[in-house]
Image: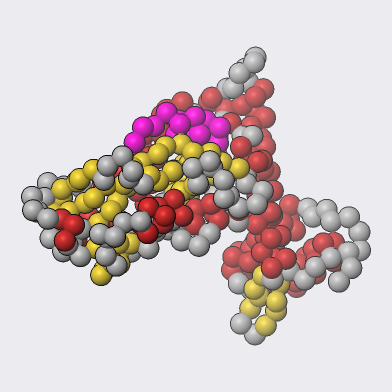
Amino acid sequence: MTAAGPAELAPRELRVLVAVAETGGFSAAAVRLGLTQSAVSHSVRGSEAKLGAVLFERGRAGASPTAAGERAVALARRILRLYESLGSEVRAAAGTSGGVDRGALRGVLRIAAFRSAALHLLPPALDRLTARYPGVRPEVRVVRELGAGTAGEVAAGRADLAVATLNADGSGLPPGLLGGVLVEEAYALVHPAGHADPRSLPLLDWDENCGSYTRAWWRAQDWIPCATVKAEDDGMVLTMVGRGLGMAIMPELSLREAGDSVGITDLGPSRPVRHVGYVTAPESAATVAVRALIRELRSEKV
């Protein structure tokens, strides 16, 4: 397919692309948007002509984005977010001289975070943020740190900011995104309280636990057995440890939920650490709400 002209899509065309991708078909997208199916189909064909690429595979089961379509939809979401925030950002800037009118800043701030960060790192930061900017409404989605993880939500345009696990230097982000380390949390040996030899217990683990930041350390420890049980999240691992079913190696944020039945032993100076940081898109990083949330997160201590 050859582009017929400049790839300039209007907001309504972007909304159609997002609706088709999220509903899985032209008919469902038409219902969501209050349009006819033919209008949706015509809009998609027009967008494909402008962009010079097939965006959706059509079939009896509906419509699914191609690789080009996935990219187009992700960028469409991000562009639409700028449209949504434009008025609020401008009014906030216009309300004062040399500062921000906190009362004028309004709208939803979409955040993706893994479970322990959503439970323990975000709440105090969001409390301070909303006290400072009462018109900002945070929406937090808990996303498992597997595959694209929380950073993938930002890349796909579904979140304005993600709390994610990063490399020590903040690298390894999806292309086009930016971020930085907020806190470092050490791992510790977690075991049933009072156990005489916790290292002899079976290992309990969960899928998100072992990232690139701990693999080298784990390979060097000849006392760590293969995991006998894998749980879906760190909260389940803590519960199982407290019931005497095994030991685990867990980071500090997760250990805030440890009860009296759980013992925690330091792994020494060579213990691994997890680097927790923020990820956002360049256009979101320029908005008042995202900048303010990053400041509040930076002031948090594990």
Q: Is residue 201 magenta?
A: no
Question: Can the viewer see residue 238 in this picture?
Answer: yes
Q: Is residue 155 left or right of residue 294?
A: right
Q: Position of residue 243 (x, y in %)?
A: 13, 60
Residue at image position (22%, 55%) is 238
Colouring scheme applied when the structure was drawn:
secondary structure
> Where is residue 146 shown, x and y percent of the image?
46, 61
Residue at image position (50%, 46%) is 167
Residue 209 lies, with reference to residue 136, above or below; the image says below
- Is the residue 40 above or below the residue 87 in the image? below
Q: Position of residue 192 (x, y in %)?
A: 13, 54
Question: Total of numbered circles in the picture?
Answer: 0
Q: Which residues are magenta?
A: 289-302
Which residue lies at the image location 55% right of the left edge and 36% below the top edge?
290
**Closer to the camera, 199 or 194?**
199
Task: Tell me which residue sits at (78%, 65%) in the image.
Answer: 43
Residue 107 drawn at (x, y percent): 55, 39
Q: Nearer the viewer, residue 230 or 63?
A: 230
In magenta segment, residue 292: yes
Quarter of the image containing the C terminus?
top left
* Quarter in which the N terminus is drawn: bottom right
Camera-side residue: 259 or 226?
226
Task: Look at the picture and state if 302 lies above or below 225.
Answer: above
Magenta stretch: dominant SS? helix
Q: Nearer the viewer, residue 223 or 215?
A: 223
